[in-house]
Image: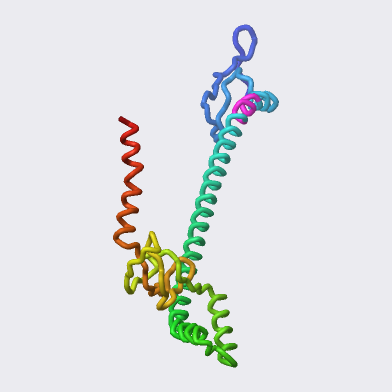
């Protein structure tokens, strides 16, 4: 149908309807305002690149610091575990050695009477023939296992490893000295298996008094000199 003409002969235009809704009802997308220029893909990339360049170094530094902290913690954990393992191994070896020494002491302690018989036989020239061979083999075996015999006549008396059966005054000694060994002592390492039973010769009262006077004389001389 033709539109009516106005007085000037021109066709009259109908009302113009502008859709100013921001959301397109057909597509559901957000419309850009009229007159606004949609940003191009190139401009978006150009604006994103500087932001990425600014944020990347900070993220790398934070990640690097985190990795360094983690490496330090793991290293400390490994050092602590290694120290605990070393201490555990030392403790096990020490306990094992103590158990071995104790068991060996018990076994060798049972052989001491036999060794005493061998020693008495040797002192009376009765260690001969096959008995001598067996006795010497047994002595060599226990010595190889760490058993050590001690206490000889003339040794200085030590109450830590010697058992004094009797004390005999003697002017020939200035300190307690073993005069006779009744029963030798045995030890393994620093452990005494059996103390030596001995007769001790001690200095006489006169010798003891003279020794005390000699020990006191330097003190008197020093006191005179100090005056």
**Quadrant of the image occupied by residue 153:** bottom left
Q: Secondary structure of the magenta portion, mostly? A: helix
**Picture residue at 62% right of the left edge, 29% below the top:** 57
- Would you say 215 lies left or right of 5 here? left
Question: In the image, residue 107 lies at what x, y percent?
Answer: 46, 81
**Bounds of the magenta span?**
50-56
Determine the residue positioned at 57% across, 19% down.
14
How is colour applied across the structure in the image? rainbow
Query: Above or below — where is 63 with respect to 126?
Result: above
Residue nearer the viewer, 33 or 148: 148
Q: Is residue 52 magenta?
A: yes
Image position of 126 with respect to 31: above or below: below
Specify whether 183 is left or right of 61: left
Residue 19, picture quadrant: top right
Q: Position of residue 101 (x, y in %)?
A: 47, 72
- Quadrant in which the C terminus appears: top left
Asked whether residue 135 is drawn in magenta, I would say no
Q: Residue at x 35, y 49 (%)?
A: 214
Hey, which residue is sitting farthest bottom in the picture? 130
On the rendered image, what quadrant is the N terminus found in?
top right
Q: Position of residue 150 (x, y in %)?
A: 47, 71
């Amino acid at each position: 149908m033709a539109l009516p003409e106005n007085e000037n002969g021109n066709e009259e235009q109908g009302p113009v309807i502008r859709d100013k809704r921001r959301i397109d009802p057909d597509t559901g997308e957000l419309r850009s305002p009229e007159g606004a220029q949609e940003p191009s893909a190139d401009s978006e990339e150009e604006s994103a690149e500087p932001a990425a360049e600014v944020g990347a170094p900070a993220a790398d530094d934070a990640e690097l610091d985190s990795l360094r902290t983690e490496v330090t913690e793991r290293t400390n954990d490994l050092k602590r575990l290694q120290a605990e393992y070393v201490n555990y191994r030392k403790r096990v070896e020490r306990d094992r050695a103590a158990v071995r020494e104790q068991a060996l002491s018990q076994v060798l302690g049972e052989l001491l009477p036999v060794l005493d018989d061998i020693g008495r036989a040797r002192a009376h020239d009765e260690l001969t023939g096959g008995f001598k061979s067996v006795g010497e083999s047994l002595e060599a075996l226990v010595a190889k296992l760490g058993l050590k015999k001690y206490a000889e006549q003339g040794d200085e008396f030590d109450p830590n490893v010697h058992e004094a059966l009797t004390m005999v005054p003697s002017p020939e000694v200035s300190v307690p000295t073993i005069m006779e060994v009744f029963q030798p002592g045995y030890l393994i390492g620093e452990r005494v298996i059996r103390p030596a039973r001995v007769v001790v010769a001690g200095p006489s009262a006169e010798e003891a008094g003279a020794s005390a006077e000699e020990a006191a004389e330097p003190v008197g001389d020093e006191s005179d000199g100090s005056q």
